[in-house]
Amino acid sequence: MKTRLVKADSAAVNEAASLLREGQVVAFPTETVYGLGADGLNGDAVARIFAVKNRPADNPLILHIASRRDLDALVTRIPPAAEAAMVEFWPGPLTLVMEKTDAVPPIVTAGLPTVAVRMPSHPVARRLIAVAGRPLAAPSANRSGRPSPTRAGDVLDDMDGRIPLILDGGSCAVGVESTVLDVTGPTPRILRPGGVTREMLWRTLGPVDEAPSVMRPLDEGEAAPSPGMRHRHYAPRVPLTIVEGGAPALFLRYDQAETRGKTPVLLCTAQTARDAGSRRCVVMGDRDDADTIAESLFSALRELDRVGADIAFAEAVEPAGVGLAVMNRLLRAAQFRVEGRNTR
Ligand code: TXA
Ligand code: MG
């Protein structure tokens, strides 16, 4: 199959919507990351998403809607916390998990009785959903296990030959995926931290829980609250370790690796890169502005594989605000390898 990458003007959006109505899979920009969309009410179309992504069948998808009215057909009940969250954060990077209706094919939810729904704010995503006239099931448009794509070219790297069309809407402003919030229980629970921060949720909803797997690996045999957490994620090909203790600790690890005959690279903030001398760096944003780190994180993870290094060390980020989502992704990219400031 030939994959075309086209600027997301209105003709391209209309063409993408026709392909979606025919049951095809199309990539499109959202404010978080690029999505790989299909008609969310057509089980055969949704099955194509799993095939082109190589996604495990037990990892459910998010349904994307363009208007609040689209929600009624998908969920049996809208809990008060969901109502409040939608008023405050939709459209935007917040996904709500609610009880599903029979209109949602079981393949979308991997057989779960709940469905994840979000209303993106990106104008191309909104227009595409509206013109297609149905909710779009859409995971991130990477091949399973790879960093999520935040630029159309990254989608092409992963999807060339697998889908007919990629809508190019430039780079994604948020850069990490939506926050997944389960609102089916008495207390809302964050299953995946993302663009809408824990602090923002607390301000609007009061106490909010957090799945333990947000910042640590699941234990052997432990049930995953969000099935996506079970799977290997975001990993660059070069082995990555997070190093705590700031620039001095990073530089030490780098120099030790070089002494051992390795070709290291640092994944670090602009401030650290400025002091790094001749050490090779891939920059991920500004240390004092977590939003800029989130925005560039996934493209930086992809860049790590292009610089010809055989070992990589990442700077730890303060897990506050969107920094929590950054560390959640970075920990998975490093397969939870973290070195403290005094360890060797
Ligand atoms: O920002 C985003 O959310 C992007 C853009 C494209 O919208 N989409 C995205 O989708 O990140 P994906 O498939 O890569 O991640 C969906 C996450 C997974 O961790 C999945 O396990 C979880 O949502 N999820 C989906 N349905 C669920 C459900 N019913 N219960 C619990 N978790 C669910
Ligand atoms: Mg994903």
Image (cartoon, helix red, strand yellow):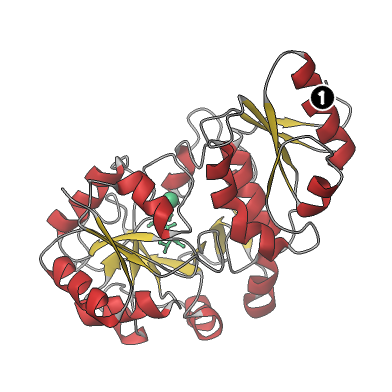
Residue 252 location, x and y as percent?
A: 85, 28
Visible in this render: residue 133?
no
* Amino acid of disc 1: Asp
What residue appears at the point 42 percent right and 45 percent down from the top-left corner?
A: 227
- In the rendered view, tell whether residue 101 sits above or below residue 50: below
What residue appears at the point 45 percent right and 41 percent down from the top-left corner?
A: 146
The residue tagged 1 is 255
- In the rendered view, tell whether residue 194 sits above or below residue 160: below
Could you tell me which secondary element the residue under label 1 belongs to?
helix
Residue 215 location, x and y as percent?
A: 65, 45
Residue 261 location, x and y as percent?
A: 71, 14
Residue placed most toward the observer, 305 or 277: 277
Visible in this render: residue 262?
yes
- Image quarter of the C terminus: top right
Q: Quadrant of residue 129?
A: bottom left
- Left or right: residue 205 versus residue 133 is right
What residue appears at the point 66 percent right and 65 percent down from the top-left corner?
A: 198
- Left or right: residue 206 versus residue 91 is right
